[in-house]
Amino acid sequence: MRRSDSWKELRKELVDRQLIARGIKDKKVLDAFLKVPRHEFVLPEYLDESYNDYPLPIGFGQTISQPYMIAYMMEALELQGGEKVLEIGTGSGYTTALLAEIAKEIYTVERIGPLLERARKILEELGYNNIYFKEGDGTLGWPEYAPYERIIVTASAPSVPTPLFEQLDEGGILLIPVASGFGDVLKRVKKIKGKMVEENLTYCAFVPLIGKYGFKEK
Ligand code: SAH
């Protein structure tokens, strides 16, 4: 068997055992997970663990997110296909690729320059041409291209950063983990007639969001 066949089989197993078996139903989300090669985004020393359902280190104290949690967040984003999406916390670029499979344009912001450059290179090599990259403090959003129909933050914040809510389109959806006394709570925020409507969806664990409207750097 060629290695590319076995990666494909491992992706299928991940989708069947970790996503479908645990309730993920959105076909667009499942198809994206079947397609995006997570092994291209992990560090070489973790290659054999590429399709295991947990986060893995990517350097600089950061991680590539757990597949199930990303699938859960993407389903909760209710993507239809034509959206302009803002992603805060590019990290490895894995989530960016999954989003780029479904939405129209992804604007992604990462505060650690070398991580952003690594992600940019991988995503360009994989042929994505609907992703725009920015190095900087994502708690400030990316005002030049606002508003966004969807915003996803893959690091945990002390509270919902004001600029992100401001840059959310009317009727838009923002997904963000917020730190609580019991780990992080995944919040879904909708903008309805200009007002913030919040729901707590589940518990989760993410690295901290660091910035002006996030946590202070230690
Ligand atoms: N979804 C990514 C997860 C990366 S971990 C993946 O699957 O690879 C979260 C990322 O958020 C880290 O790379 C971290 O550097 C970044 N981050 C933390 N605070 C940030 C901020 N204020 N602006 C932009 N990125 C931030």
Image (tube, rainbow, N blue to C red):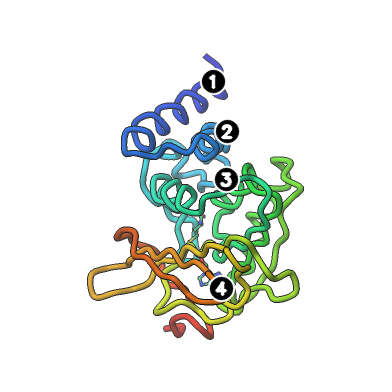
Residue 135, placed above or below residue 4: below
Q: Earlier in the sequence, mark 2 or mark 3?
A: 2
Is the CB atom of the residue marked by disc 2 within 8 angstroms of ligand 1's nearest atom? no
Q: CA distance from mark 1 to mark 2?
A: 12 Å
Q: Nearer the viewer, mark 1 or mark 3?
A: 3
Q: Nearer the viewer, mark 1 or mark 2?
A: 2
Where residue 117 sits in the image (x, y, percent)? 67, 60
Q: Please tell me which residue is depicted at 51% across the width and 44% down the height of the picture.
A: 44
The three-letter code of the residue at mark 2 reads Lys
Q: Earlier in the sequence, mark 3 or mark 4?
A: 3
Q: Which is nearer the eye, 201 or 140?
A: 201
Residue 180, placed above or below residue 171: below
The three-letter code of the residue at mark 3 reads Leu
Q: Which residue lies under the disc numbered 3?
A: 98
The three-letter code of the residue at mark 4 reads Lys
Q: Which residue lies under the disc numbered 2?
A: 35
Q: Which residue lies under the disc numbered 4?
A: 193
Q: CA distance from mark 2 to mark 4?
A: 37 Å
Q: Which residue lies under the disc numbered 1?
A: 5
Circles 3 and 4: CB distance less than 8 Å?
A: no
The three-letter code of the residue at mark 1 reads Asp
Q: Quadrant of residue 111?
A: bottom right
Q: Nearer the viewer, mark 4 or mark 1?
A: 4
Circles 2 and 3: CB distance less than 8 Å?
A: no
